[in-house]
Image (cartoon, rainbow, N blue to C red):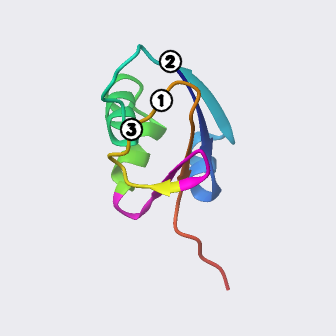
């Protein structure tokens, strides 16, 4: 299953890219939460940073804000949205 992942603001800086397409073995229970937990174990680095910020990061699937436990399907677009600050 292919998932397009979008990174915004400070998360984009951590990953040093705006988007990434990942090919994941089909998993009927795949959620944004499961995805980052798995990647934080296998790839570490920025995925661990994202996992540690999970409480303040929102997720969107196909441009709709969802919960971390929402299911992902083949071809979905997953976005990680950190809190926006400004001044």
Q: Residues within 10 Å of mark 1 (few under 14, many from 20)?
A: some
Q: Distance between the Cα atoms at labels 1 and 3?
A: 7 Å
Q: Say which residue label 3 marks.
A: 71
The circle drawn on residue 65 is none
Residue that numbered label 2 is attached to: 1
Task: Give the vertical position of 41 relative to 19 (above or below).
Answer: above
Region rendered in magenta: 55-64
Quadrant where the C terminus sits is bottom right
Q: Position of residue 51 (x, y in %)?
A: 36, 46
Query: Which residue in the protein does label 1 denote?
Result: 73
In the image, residue 18 lies in the stretch drawn in magenta:
no
Q: Is residue 72 left or right of residue 84?
A: left
Q: Are marks 1 and 3 in contact (CB under 8 Å)?
A: yes
Q: Earlier in the sequence, mark 2 or mark 3?
A: 2
First in residue order: circle 2 vs circle 1? 2
Helix, strand or loop at disc 1?
Answer: loop
- Which residue does the image show at 61% across and 51% down from the upper left? 63
Name the residue: 34% across, 51% down: 52
In space, the residues marked 2 and 1 are separated at their CA atoms by 7 Å
Front-lying residue, 4 or 62 = 62
């Amino acid at each position: 299953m292919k998932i397009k992942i979008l990174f915004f603001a400070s998360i984009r800086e951590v990953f040093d890219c705006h988007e990434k397409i990942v090919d994941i073995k089909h998993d009927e229970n795949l959620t944004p939460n499961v995805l980052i937990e798995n990647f934080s174990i296998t790839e570490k680095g920025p995925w661990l940073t994202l996992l540690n910020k999970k409480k303040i990061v929102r997720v969107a699937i196909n441009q709709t804000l969802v919960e971390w436990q929402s299911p992902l399907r083949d071809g979905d677009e997953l976005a990680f949205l950190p809190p926006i600050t400004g001044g």
